[in-house]
């Protein structure tokens, strides 16, 4: 009889996935390390149901390879981040185009709301709050566009992007330049300059990609 996950198990699985994702992206677990269901259940003091849910989530994100009872950490290389951000840019550009054609006024208003949260987080030097606001800013493109499948693909990769951004933001005392970049993009959208907005979005995401891949660049070259 197949196992029927409970709401509690799914919620716990999300929490375990978040912690394992953090440990993989920050290097606590290295590529090639094994994650065994039984050992993880002991570590987190949980049944295997939530552990299994967490491993399925991370496998869908491409951070681990799984077999029946264990998983191997794949992690992220600089090339992986390039691929992830190429996918992100193509989706985000399409979502922004649709959103601009759908309701530019609403789009601009929602972006301004997220900018307020970003400014506050930058002033208080709260990287976690800043990262959450940053991702809300970009998620507005998808919610305004109203295309469910685009939003679903974004949701699949968003946790990995969020953890990468958080790990990066924690290294910076001054997030002001990032706020300014988001403000410029929002201003171009609000004033109806789509060509300039798309060019700025490309530059914005490319800068983020380069900043995020720095800690992983040595992995692409291999040992030594």
Image: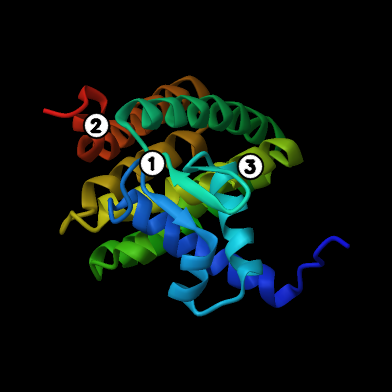
> In which quadrant is the C terminus drawn?
top left
User: Residue 134: percent from the left, percent from the top?
Assistant: 42, 52
Q: Secondary structure at mark 2?
A: helix
* Residue lying at 50% horizontally and 48% vertically, measured from the top left: 71
Q: Secondary structure at mark 1?
A: loop
Sooner in the amino-acid sequence: mark 2 or mark 3: 3
The answer to whether residue 147 is above or below residue 111 is: above
User: Residue 121's quadrant in the figure?
Assistant: bottom left
Do we see residue 38 in this rendering? yes
Farthest residue toward the left?
224
User: Residue 168: percent from the left, percent from the top?
Assistant: 26, 50
Q: Could you give the CA–CA distance between mark 3 and mark 1, rounded to whole angstroms?
A: 27 Å
Label 3 belongs to which residue?
142
Q: Secondary structure at mark 3?
A: helix
Label 2 belongs to which residue?
219
Q: Would you say 55 lies left or right of 125 here?
A: right
Q: Could you give the CA–CA distance between mark 2 and mark 3, rounded to whole angstroms?
A: 33 Å
Camera-near label (3 vs 1) is 1
Q: Would you say 8 lies left or right of 36 here?
A: right
> In which quadrant is the N terminus drawn?
bottom right
Sooner in the amino-acid sequence: mark 3 or mark 1: 1
Label 1 belongs to which residue?
75
């Amino acid at each position: 009889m197949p196992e029927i996950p409970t709401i509690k198990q799914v919620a716990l699985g999300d929490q375990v996935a978040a912690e394992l994702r953090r440990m993989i992206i920050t290097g606590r677990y290295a590529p090639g390390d094994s994650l065994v269901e039984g050992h993880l259940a002991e570590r987190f003091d949980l049944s295997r149901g939530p552990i299994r849910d967490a491993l399925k989530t991370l496998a869908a994100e491409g951070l681990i390879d799984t077999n029946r009872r264990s998983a191997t950490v794949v992690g992220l290389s600089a090339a992986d981040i390039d691929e992830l951000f190429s996918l992100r840019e193509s989706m985000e550009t399409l979502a922004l185009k649709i959103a601009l054609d759908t309701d530019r006024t609403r789009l601009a208003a929602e972006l301004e709301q997220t900018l307020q949260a970003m400014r506050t987080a930058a002033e208080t030097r709260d990287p976690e709050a800043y990262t959450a606001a940053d991702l809300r800013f970009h998620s507005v493109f998808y919610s305004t566009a109203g295309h469910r499948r685009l939003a679903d693909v974004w949701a699949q990769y968003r946790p990995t992007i969020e953890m990468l951004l958080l790990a990066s933001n924690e290294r910076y005392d001054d997030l002001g330049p990032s706020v300014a970049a988001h403000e410029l993009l929002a201003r171009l959208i609000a004033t109806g300059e789509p060509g300039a907005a798309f060019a700025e979005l490309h530059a914005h995401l490319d800068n983020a990609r380069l900043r995020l891949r720095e800690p992983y660049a040595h992995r692409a070259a291999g040992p030594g």
